[in-house]
Amino acid sequence: MKREITCYRYLRPTSDQWNLGVCWAMVIARLLSAVYSKQLSNGSPVELSPQHMVDCFYPIIKDYLNEDDVGSQGDYPLSTSFALILATYIKGIFLESEYEYEAVRGECRQNVEGVRVAPTEEQIYHFEDTEDDLILIKSTLDKGIPIAANIDPCDSFHEYKNGIFTVGPDEEKGKGSGHSVLIVGYGQDGVVPYYWIQNSWGEEWGIEGFGKVQRSLLTHLVTTFNVTARLKTD
């Protein structure tokens, strides 16, 4: 598994979002954590705060959202991922140690002090469904940079344990706004190309929180190639 998960060295342990629809925040925080960890000279893992995004970012991204974009749990599809990463560019994300996850949607904490980490705006990239971008996706993953993506989760995705996840022709499609995951590697089994993903449903899901998903089932791929740390500013 680790041989194909090219981003493994820079990933934080798989977390569990519990019953709160914040997969988008989990994915974007973990993506930027990995990119920033990779940039550090010693490669030390950095963990950024999804709770900070949950509590504080909605006022920034709401102008990008239609009512149909918001799921019943208050989650957002990763079609809005560009807006979400742009929000982190504007505000930056606190470290998890400064703004811990509580699995509730709360008020934005105004008394938090510390350094925020943010992407570089011109390095935010949204992949298209082209052969050229497929090559770029693979080279990005080969460099240890993960990619945020969206999947429409049907019942069998919730029950996934191992192997390559595919959707059969008679299987019910997922319902709702979609689910955000992090692409962390790739491979091919016979004629079936797949991506390795890291989910946010705890280590009980899949293979210790990871899984292999047929490549065509993942959409709205986006990443950032560079992030910076800066002092807290409002």
Image (cartoon, helix red, strand yellow):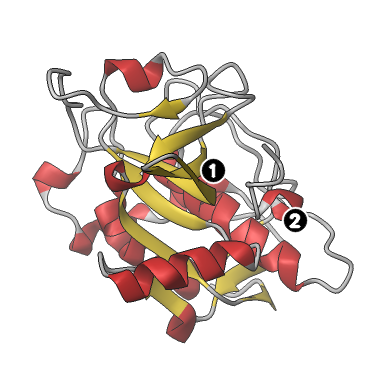
Residue mark closest to the camera, 2 vs 1 = 2
**Which residue is nearer to you in this view: 230 or 86?**
86
Residue 104, image x and y in percent? 47, 29
Q: Is residue 169 left or right of residue 78?
A: left
Tag 2 near tag 1, CB within 8 Å: no
Residue located 31% across and 70% down the image: 131
Circle 2 crowding by C-alpha within 10 Å: few under 14, some 14–19, many from 20? many
Residue under the point 61% across and 49% down: 49
Q: Nearer the viewer, residue 110 or 209?
A: 209
Residue 7 occupies which quadrant of the picture? bottom right
Dot label at residue 214: none
State the residue at coordinates (65%, 57%). Answer: 33
Q: CA distance from mark 2 to mark 1?
A: 15 Å
SS class, disc 2: loop
Q: Position of residue 231 (x, y in %)?
A: 69, 75
> Amino acid under label 2?
Val
Residue 187, above or below 46 = above
Question: Where does label 1 land, which residue?
Answer: 51
| Tag 1: amino acid | Gln
Image quadrant assignment for residue 148: bottom left
- Expressed as whole percent of the image width and height from the top left, the position of residue 225 reads 55, 75
Q: Which one is nearer the viewer's eye here, 96 or 13? A: 13
Residue underneath mark 2: 46
Seen as rendered, the residue at the extreme bottom is: 122
Residue 56 is situated, as x and y percent measured from the top left of the image, at: 45, 53
Residue at (48, 73) in percent of width and height: 89
